[in-house]
Amino acid sequence: NAGVTQTPKFQVLKTGQSMTLQCAQDMNHNSMYWYRQDPGMGLRLIYYSASEGTTDKGEVPNGYNVSRLNKREFSLRLESAAPSQTSVYFCASKVVTGQETQYFGPGTRLLVL
Amino acid sequence: QKEVEQNSGPLSVPEGAIASLNCTYSDRVSQSFFWYRQYSGKSPELIMSIYSNGDKEDGRFTAQLNKASQYVSLLIRDSQPSDSATYLCAVITLGNTGKLIFGQGTTLQVKP
């Protein structure tokens, strides 16, 4: 049981390049989330998927797209990377057991030059 | 006004002392409150959740919630150097089900 996994762990892009961040969970969770974390900003929600087949915008969706490929996988795509998207990206998934616990992946560090 | 606010710190306490971490939130209909711990370079992990007014204790950790004052706190008793981390307060608001709103986090340093 690996929990939430993310690939890649680290990526350097040039401005204008595109890439997809992958996230998978093996806990049979319905809900999945993408956050970015910048120094002094806490975690900000980019997109989320309440269930397979649905996606919704979060607090900072501009410049990103997502795909909920199936129940396990939720990907985040940067179509044209900008230096402002340099950040650490976390994927999370959730089970509702009365505690609304979200489990986080290890993160992807992205540097856009 | 930010929806969830924390003092970014660093908060420095000696080993064995009580560390008190505070968080205020702006939306009165907020209903669920969480404390996450994040070690440097790692992902957040949930350490406490609280849903009703009062105190909730779990080992050395106590979460306190006061909805009238829109205030939630985390007390860490007998602080250890291993408690040194950033503590993130997060809130779920009615009508915003499942979406966590995070504060910016408070960095705690426990000095031996």
Image (spheres, grey):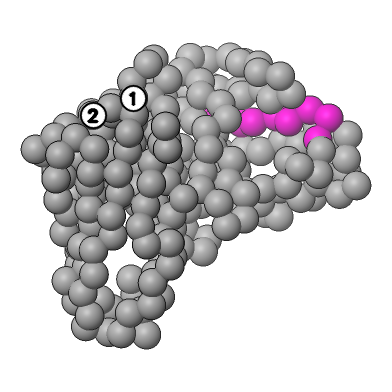
Label 2 packing within 10 angstroms: few (<14), some (14-19), many (20+): some
Q: Position of residue A107 (x, y in %)?
A: 43, 55
Residue positioned most to the front = A1
Q: Secondary structure at mark 2?
A: loop
Residue occupying image coordinates x 11% and y 38%: A54
- Specify the quadrant that holds the C terminus of chain A: bottom left
**In this figure, which residue is indicated by the disc labeled 2?**
A30
Q: Nearer the viewer, residue B87 or B44?
A: B44
Mark 1 = which residue? A95
Q: Which amino acid type is marked by label 1?
A: Val
A45 left or right of B41? Answer: left
The answer to whether residue A37 is above or below residue A49 is below
Taking the spot 14% from the left edge, 50% from the top edge, the residue there is A67
- Indicate yes or no whether the magenta region holds residue A106: no
Label 2 is placed on what type of residue? Asn
Q: Is residue A36 visible?
A: no
Main SS, magenta region, reads strand
How far is the residue under mark 1 from the one under mark 2?
7 Å
Residue A12: x, y in percent?
38, 77
Q: Quadrant of residue B93?
A: top left
Q: Chain of mark 1?
A: A
Residue at image x 48%, y 14%?
A: B52
Q: Chain of mark 2?
A: A
Report whether A90 appears left or right of B64: left
